[in-house]
Amino acid sequence: MLPVLPPEARLLLLATRPPDSQIENELADLVKQPLNWRLVGAMAEREKLLPVLWNRLGKHASSLPTEEAERIRRQAAVIEFRMAVAESVLEGVLKRLAGEQIRVMLLKGAALATTVYDSFAARPMGDLDILVPPEDAARAWQCLVDAGWKKEFAGGEVFYEGHHHLAALVDPKGLGIVLEVHRAILPPSGPFLSDETDLWRDATPVRLGTNEAWVPSRQHQLLHLCTHFAWSNMLATGLGRTARDVAALLDTGDLDWNGFIALARRSRAGTCAFWTLTLARELAQAAVPATVIEQLRPRQPRMLTTALERALAASSLLGACPSIRMRQWLWKAAILPGHSGHQAALPWQVEVAFLEAFPRGGRTSLGARAAAHTRRWAAWLRFAGIFGIPRPIV
């Protein structure tokens, strides 16, 4: 595991791995250390892994500070209940859309919870994502609105006209369950070449309750994990749960790696796949062959790749990167959009368009931004140390 990560991060990452005697011994040793349990809880909450963490730490609860152990336990119980509700809500959505003869494919957390993990509680998620054939998307969305679902945000019609999903909806019972109806698996404004025909052709049928749905093939699920983390999330958020998902998906059986590499390259997602798989292999012991990593490796000095791995892990898990500009520079240095055939497409353009459609207050002045950078000088120094540690990790 990356040496730049503090014991709190190592604890969280170990708790996401399948249990074995060595990992249990490491966890038992870590919980006895004087850890910052607030940081552990904050990381687990940000990564949507609180129930996963508590289910592994429950047997070690006596070694935790009583107040912190109770706080994590309560939060985990709330999330587990919410996931059970989300599963029930999704069953209702599938039933209603089936009545309209609309095929539904589960994406992201919903697909993984149904095929890779034992339950929705074992794969907590922030919202529900479904894909329908593009010609049925507007009808599916309106069907749910007619059933009482409400738009999460008012307005934004122009933004969603060119987006890969329609305006997010909130469940009609006021439970705060958010649903996104996708008409494409990836943003059309992005750089990727995605063949929805192949996606549906290779999809696998599953049952959720009494309802039938579809999930992407394992190759397409893995590619979606890679592109969502490395492009949509800019390698900056969701690393812990993505590494866990990749490891869990690969544990379900052998993958046609030659086919996956061809798919990633054909989709212009080679560098996205490299970084996601490299970090998942390092942090979650994902069963990614070294030969696959080498075939996907971008053309850059290995010293830079090593430094980027440290910086990206620390930035995503710990929020160590001190500025937005630096995060964008790290992303460009890692993904190499110019060499990946991405043309002018950049992930933060989507955020800019969203903020223009849904403004959230005034723009911070240049002086205020400069003052904030000055106050963060210590964070800059710490980050420079992380980026420059001269020992190999990859």
Image: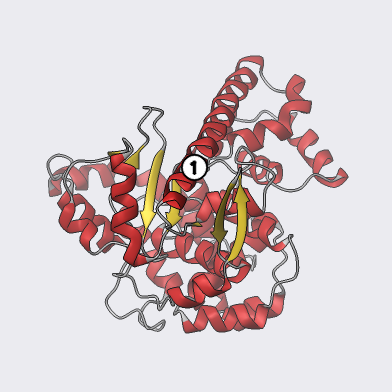
Q: Which residue is mark 1?
A: 90
Q: Which residue appears farthest toward the right when viewing the image?
A: 21
Taking 355 as reference, is 191 left or right?
Answer: right
Give the image location of residue 116, x and y in percent. 67, 53
Residue 305 in view of the camera: no
Q: Nearer the viewer, residue 24 or 39?
A: 24
Q: Nearer the viewer, residue 358 or 382?
A: 358
Residue at (63% x, 65% y) in the render: 391
Taking 368 as reference, is 293 left or right?
Answer: right
Q: Residues within 10 Å of mark 1 (few under 14, many from 20)?
A: many
Q: Nearer the viewer, residue 388 or 94?
A: 94
Please tell me in which quadrant of the rendered image residue 348 appears: bottom left
Q: Amino acid at mark 1?
A: Leu
- Note whether 93 is above or below 59 in the view shown: below
Instruction: Say which quadrant the N terminus sits in.
Output: bottom right
How many numbered marks have been drawn onto this rendered protein structure? 1
- Note whether 91 is above or below 300 in the view shown: above
Give the image location of residue 373, x and y in percent. 27, 47
Residue at (67% x, 48% y) in the render: 117
Q: Nearer the viewer, residue 320 or 290?
A: 290
Q: Which residue appears farthest toward the top when viewing the image?
A: 67
Give the image location of residue 41, x and y in percent. 56, 31
Give the image location of residue 93, x and y in percent. 45, 44
Instruction: Say which quadrant the C terminus sits in.
Output: bottom right
Residue 79 in view of the camera: yes
Residue at (35% x, 81% y) in the render: 338
Residue at (31% x, 70% y) in the render: 188
